[in-house]
């Protein structure tokens, strides 16, 4: 049954929240884990839908997946009997395409369905394929499947035409056991690239320079077992930072403050207080914040995955702000939903022009995609009255126990079945 969130807005968030493991790092790491025949243990795994779907795809090709608890998994890739990832897996989670790089790197062949477009725009994977070809693989696309094979993979110098997180990770996977040396120029620098590289190195790979735009990979003949703990999720942390900045005081624990700098700087610029500790940040605001300009960029720039959340905050701030989306073409679909709550935002091309309003009012709205859905939750938490958000399966792709974490900060939010009037009444009676 479909669920929805119901929120009663207006209570400032106060207290502490603990951030889980990084979803986007975990997706690369789980794919990498199948590249050895020895058992790999991965800890601090977020228990979210994307991860669980990828684990099913990994089981689907015959690897042994043993869930030790909700945040720990053991994977053994020695039992893999199939190198085909079908459309059903890719449709549910695009990042299943990391299995293309992982299988190609391990077995010199792989067959993975070509992902289609998605809710935030057309998402080509030409740079991934260019990388595989440069390593000597033949890549063809037939009947919706990408087929790739090589007699042997040989290291090469690869210059990415666009900075791509996915292509950088996929090429690292495909090349770490290739013959000789691979160099990826114009590589993405996101924290999850570094985490995937660190994980591969813990398995015996020889990858240097991850986190810079030039990654050097010396092929090794074999990878071995490892125990590895995934870094904290930058975007989950950023979402709670923004929620706290609407009005509140929250200590966000288990984060790497360095990864949050682009977000912290913007929040401070518009008047919120951000205090950094070794592995926590505290964000508070007790007054209406100011306006600014935000432009999404590859790391260390402002993350596109935080664009809807910061736009929601600016929609409540004083004055006129602009938010420019420079990574994806169709990432403003939440604007119409926010308008239903009273926001005043005009989109022109890839720029949102935001006239700050003094408050939102609760409404029945729908999550258009993962991060936009999270932004709508932030909006609901501030809005006067009740907000219901449906299509929350998008949000559950990336946020573990969102309603539980938010409720623990003093707000009123529950997950209830869609069209369940009694559950709505019960919630309203409970929260008053
Ligand atoms: C990853 C993240 C996603 C985030 C995005 C940008 C994962 C699973 N997802 O997505 O949450 O929003 O990075 O930080 O980690 N491009 C091409 N050709 C390619 C590949 C990409 O033209 O072969 C373009 C894309 O259309 C986009 C830009 O490059 O405009 C960046 O995309 P990319 O960094 O590859 O994003 P993903 O890895 O898909």
Image (spheres, helix red, strand yellow):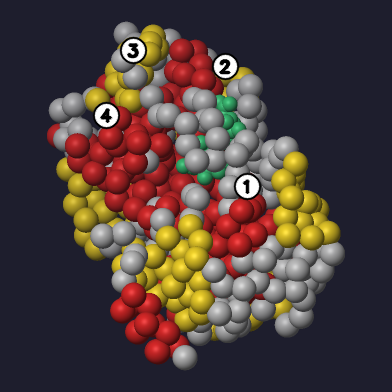
The residue lying at 54 percent from left, 68 percent from top is 363
Q: Residue at x 29, y 50 (%)?
A: 52
Can you tell which quarter of the image residue 4 is in?
bottom left
Ligand 1 visible in quadrant:
top right
Q: Secondary structure at mark 4?
A: loop
Q: Report, in whole angstroms, how far the alpha carbon at label 2 lies from the one at label 4.
A: 31 Å
Picture coordinates of residue 216, whole percent (x, y) = 55, 28
Q: Nearer the viewer, residue 418 or 408?
A: 418
From the viewer's side, name the closer residue of 198 and 186. Answer: 186
Q: How many angstroms separate mark 2 from mark 1 (CA)?
A: 37 Å
For residue 364, say whether it is visible.
yes
**Mark 1–mark 3 CB contact (< 8 Å):** no
Q: Nearer the viewer, mark 2 or mark 4?
A: 4
Q: Earlier in the sequence, mark 2 or mark 1?
A: 2
Circle 2 Cα neighbour tier, 10 Å, few/some/many (<14 / 14–19 / ≥20): some
Residue occupied by mark 4:
86
Residue, disc 2: 157
x%, y% of residue 414? 40, 75
Alpha-carbon neighbours of circle 3 within 10 Å: few (<14), some, or many (≥20)?
few
Picture coordinates of residue 392, whole percent (x, y): 41, 59
Q: Quadrant of residue 28?
A: top left
Q: Residues within 10 Å of mark 1 (few under 14, many from 20)?
A: many
Q: Which mark is residue 142?
A: 3
Q: Earlier in the sequence, mark 3 or mark 2?
A: 3
Residue at mark 1: 332
- For marks 3 and 4, give the CA distance: 13 Å
């Amino acid at each position: 049954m479909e669920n929805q969130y119901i929120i009663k807005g207006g209570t400032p968030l106060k207290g502490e929240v603990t951030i889980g493991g990084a979803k986007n790092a975990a997706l690369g790491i789980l794919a990498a884990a199948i590249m050895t025949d020895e058992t790999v243990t991965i800890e601090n795994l977020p228990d979210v839908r994307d991860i669980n779907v990828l684990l099913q795809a990994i089981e689907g090709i015959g690897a042994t997946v043993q869930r030790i608890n909700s945040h720990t998994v053991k994977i053994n890739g020695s039992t893999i009997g199939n190198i085909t990832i079908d459309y059903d897996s890719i449709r549910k989670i695009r990042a299943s395409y990391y299995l293309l790089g992982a299988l190609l790197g391990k077995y010199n062949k792989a067959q993975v369905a070509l992902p289609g477009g998605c809710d935030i725009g057309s998402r080509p994977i030409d740079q991934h394929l260019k990388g595989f070809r440069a390593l000597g693989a033949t890549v063809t696309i037939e009947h919706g499947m990408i087929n790739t094979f090589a007699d042997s993979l040989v290291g090469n110098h690869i210059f990415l035409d666009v900075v791509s997180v996915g292509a950088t990770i996929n090429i690292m996977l495909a090349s770490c056991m290739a013959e000789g040396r691979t160099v990826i120029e114009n590589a993405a620098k996101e924290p999850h690239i570094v985490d995937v590289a660190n994980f591969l190195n813990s398995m015996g790979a020889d990858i240097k320079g991850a986190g810079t735009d030039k990654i050097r990979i010396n092929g090794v003949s074999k990878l071995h077992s490892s125990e590895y703990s995934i870094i904290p999720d930058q975007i989950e942390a950023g979402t709670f930072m923004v929620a706290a900045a609407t009005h509140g005081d929250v200590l966000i624990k288990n984060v790497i403050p360095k990864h949050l700098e682009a977000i912290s700087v913007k929040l401070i610029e518009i008047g919120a207080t951000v205090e950094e500790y070794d592995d926590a940040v505290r964000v508070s605001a007790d007054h209406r914040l100011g306006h600014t300009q935000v432009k999404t960029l590859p790391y260390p720039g402002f993350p596109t995955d935080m664009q809807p959340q910061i736009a929601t905050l600016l929609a409540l701030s004083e004055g006129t702000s602009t938010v420019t989306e420079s990574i994806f073409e169709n990432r403003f679909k939440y604007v119409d939903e926010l308008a239903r709550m009273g926001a005043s935002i005009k989109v022109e091309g890839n720029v949102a022009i935001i006239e700050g309003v003094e408050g939102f009012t609760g409404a029945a709205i729908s999550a258009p995609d993962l991060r936009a859905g999270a932004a709508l939750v932030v909006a609901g938490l501030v809005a006067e009255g009740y907000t219901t958000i449906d299509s929350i399966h998008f949000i559950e792709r990336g946020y573990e126990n969102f309603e539980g974490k938010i409720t623990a900060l003093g707000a009123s939010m529950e997950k209830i079945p869609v069209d369940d009037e009694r559950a709505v009444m019960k919630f309203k009676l409970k929260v008053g």
